[in-house]
Image (cartoon, grey):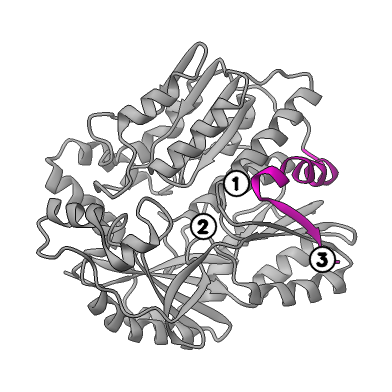
Amino acid sequence: MSKPPKGIARFDSAAAMLLALANALHDRPFASPSQSPTLDRLLPSLNRLPTGLREWGYALGGMAEGISLRQAGELDLEGIAEWMVGEYPQQEYPAAFIGSSNGALVHLAAAMGVPWLPQTFLCPVRAADSDPDDAQASFEQGKEVAAALLAAWPRLAVHHMHDPNQDRLMLDQMRYFRLKLREMPLAFNEFLMGGLPAGSTLFINHCTRQWPVTRTSDRSFFQFGALGGATEKEYLQGGPRVAEHLARYGVDRERWTPPAITDQVPEAEWGLDGYLISPLKKLAAAQNWKLMEIRYEDPEAMSYVVAEIYRDWYLAAGILPTRLTVDSFLLMDPWCSMQQHAIPFWLSFCNESSAAALQRFLEKQPPFRNIDMMLFSHGTDSIGLAEIDRWRALLTHARDEGVLIGVDEALFPRDFATFSRFDSALRERAPLLPPPPPLSVEKVVSGIKRYGAKHGVTLTALT
């Protein structure tokens, strides 16, 4: 695994999920989301520090991924695209995915043995001593960065995302800019044309989730808040939970005051910018590929569908799946899930809404003998966070044993060493056995059509 170019964060969904899938396609575990042995050795020591120092160290580690304003204007997007495709085996594939980040989709691609290319990735830009709760200042100061990023690559949409609820530790030292490709980088085109023979299938993963934003240009937007624990209304208008959250952090205000909303656009992290569909249609037609679009609004809707497809996949191979692996944001290892013959269920975060999604799934399933669960630590007592007792209660659905994997329960949600230990702990949970033969395109298409409707997931042929 090579080090990514400056301008893409490894601690974000897109890069981490791509690396998890690439490792699976190389037939090896996803041992480290950070891809930094040095950082992984330091994380256990970070966990031993007092809370304030632990938070500071976590934010400092994130800041190391950030770039300057000058570097934003020189962003090498083609270099980033080359790094992405370079992580995958250079070979022919029967299919590929492109579009929205989604952990369940990564498991589906791993079972098929095919790659996924993200439309969106996070570009963190350093901003020392910022106030996470001053939305207006972040909005004004982010305009210059957005303009620099737009100038760096003209076929890009820039979403400046500011979430003081879930990202407050990182926002103390940086700003989040999620970049969405509206046309294909050369490296993406060459990789797909070299890897997909005529007759192959290209799947567009299209999360339709929208979010209210303030438009700053024809290709740039300011998004205050994000999908997770707090509601859109709480971010924009406040409420008792917001006032309590701010008081807990000693902030002298009762609500946030973001700029006026002017538009509804695809959500910065998960939503697909539809501008990419037209060039994909042209490319698919020119290469004689089948082009299919998977659409859904809630990112976790795919988790229900993929779990059912995995169950059918195992049963067809004579394997009775009795183990459930619960992923948390970027804590996942599709290689390990397949090797342990486990059904994966991906959760976008550690919020109550994600806990409720898992509960709905478990209540409609035959009991699993074992449930292995990861928990992502984001370092803050955010609105809507599901506490350890809530997750423990969900583990009681296991018939034999439910276990939190690589989690220091006393430190959650500031258990930063979980990033370096979750995967080795997961691999110790069960024997590693050969997975079934790869899922065919036909089985995936029939599975999505069979299970998707009741979860709001549709599949449509575009060519």
Q: Position of residue 365 (x, y in %)?
A: 61, 24
Real-space Cα distance between discs 3 and 1? 22 Å
Number of marks present in the image shown: 3
Circle 2: element type: helix
- Which region shows up in magenta? 439-463
Q: Are marks 2 and 1 in contact (CB under 8 Å)?
A: no
Q: Is residue 17 toward the left or the right of residue 127 in the image?
A: right
Of the residues under marks 2 and 1, which one precedes in the sequence? 2
- Seen from the viewer's position, the closer of residues 290 and 221 is 221
- Write the residue at 28% across / 83% down: 140
Find disc 2 in the rendering and name its residue.
Answer: 14
Find disc 1 in the rendering and name its residue.
Answer: 301
Of the residues under marks 3 and 2, which one precedes in the sequence? 2
442 in magenta: yes
Q: Is residue 117 toward the left or the right of residue 213 in the image?
A: right
Circle 1: element type: helix
The three-letter amino acid code for the residue at tag 3 is Leu
Q: Is residue 65 toward the left or the right of residue 319 in the image?
A: left
The three-letter amino acid code for the residue at tag 2 is Ala
Closer to viewer: mark 2 or mark 1 = 1
Outermost residue on the top side: it is 400
Find disc 3 in the rendering and name its residue.
Answer: 462
Are there few (<14), some (14-19), or many (20+) residues within 10 Å of tag 3?
Answer: some
Q: Position of residue 383 (x, y in %)?
A: 29, 50
Circle 3: element type: loop
Relative to 75, residue 344 above or below: above
